[in-house]
């Protein structure tokens, strides 16, 4: 009873997407309405008004590809930074722990847009970094700090007895972390990492300010040439919505699979 009284309710709120789950009937129904409604809206507009809607759809696909390139590149680099940051936050060495903690506090205190400007324009005076690589690095550095906290929490969620058992079998701390603790923590951190992926996907629209030809940039180019701003940004918004909802569903399925694996073990 004392333990239950000391526990505080946990409110999970992320900046990614609402993950549709079968247990949440309202959200699951809303996801289906939004996802298939957005697809139907795009198809209807393209068929009934091919000029300009169909022309817009044929103009932006290469921007969608660039958006995915930036997102995937940034998330992969952020995962590496996040893993080392998370391990650094748990390190007993005060220097390593301090550096990792400082990185998290500084990066999380600076808006992503400012970081993009800083890496591209400020550091660009010292060393020139191509547009797309500047975008990937800035987003990876930003999200690496959040990933670090996710990895830290995931590793700390593993019972301490796992480490003690591994050490009693003669494993070093590094071996225990790499073979016992981290593999178990991966299952714990997969859902929040998926949520951060969606958040990063949406934030990738910020790279359009660096002349990176992502989805939003291509939309802006079409709108500036045809002056169809309402139609263009309607299509861009619907495409972002479809992509985001698609990946949110995949993450929901992944969470269910991880849950099944946990129950099976």
Image: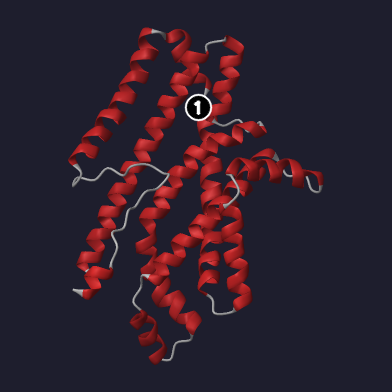
Which quarter of the image is occupied by the C terminus?
bottom left
Q: Is residue 62 visible?
A: no
Which quarter of the image is occupied by the N terminus?
bottom left
Q: Is residue 198 above or below residue 99?
A: above
* Residue 152: percent from left, percent from top: 46, 66
Q: Residue furthest right?
A: 126
Q: Residue at x 35, y 86 (%)?
A: 165
* Residue 247: percent from left, percent from top: 37, 41
Left or right of residue 257, residue 60 in this image? right
Q: Is residue 33 above or below residue 109?
A: above
Left or right of residue 34, residue 23 in this image? left
Q: Is residue 252 above or below residue 203?
A: below
* Residue 182: percent from left, percent from top: 42, 71
Q: Is residue 73 visible?
A: yes
Q: Residue at x 40, y 25 (%)?
A: 238
Q: Residue at x 60, y 48 (%)?
A: 110
Left or right of residue 76, residue 22 in this image? left
Residue under label 1, please give it. Answer: 61
Image quadrant of residue 186?
Answer: bottom left
Left or right of residue 185, residue 208 in this image? right
């Amino acid at each position: 009873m004392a333990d239950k009284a000391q526990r505080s309710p946990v409110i999970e709120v992320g900046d990614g997407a609402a993950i549709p789950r079968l247990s949440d009937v309202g959200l699951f129904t809303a996801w289906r309405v939004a996802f298939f409604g957005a697809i139907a809206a795009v198809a209807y507009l393209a068929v009934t008004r091919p000029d300009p809607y169909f022309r817009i759809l044929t103009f932006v696909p290469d921007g969608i590809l660039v958006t995915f390139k930036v997102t995937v590149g940034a998330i992969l680099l952020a995962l590496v930074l996040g893993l080392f940051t998370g391990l650094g936050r748990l390190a007993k060495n005060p220097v390593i722990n301090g550096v990792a903690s400082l990185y998290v506090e500084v990066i999380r205190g600076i808006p992503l847009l400012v970081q993009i400007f800083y890496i591209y324009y400020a550091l660009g005076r010292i060393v020139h970094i191509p547009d797309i690589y500047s975008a990937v690095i800035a987003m990876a550095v930003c999200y690496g700090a959040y990933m670090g906290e996710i990895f830290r929490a995931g590793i700390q969620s593993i019972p301490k007895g796992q480490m003690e058992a591994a050490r009693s079998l003669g494993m070093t701390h590094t071996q225990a972390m790499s073979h016992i603790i981290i593999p178990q923590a991966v299952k714990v951190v997969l859902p929040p990492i998926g949520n951060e992926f969606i958040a990063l996907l949406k934030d990738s629209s910020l790279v359009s300010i660096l002349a990176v030809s992502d989805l939003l940039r291509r939309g802006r180019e079409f709108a500036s040439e045809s002056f169809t701003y309402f139609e263009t940004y309607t299509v861009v918004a619907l495409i972002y919505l479809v992509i985001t909802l698609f990946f949110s569903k995949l993450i929901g399925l992944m969470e269910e699979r991880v849950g099944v694996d946990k129950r099976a073990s």
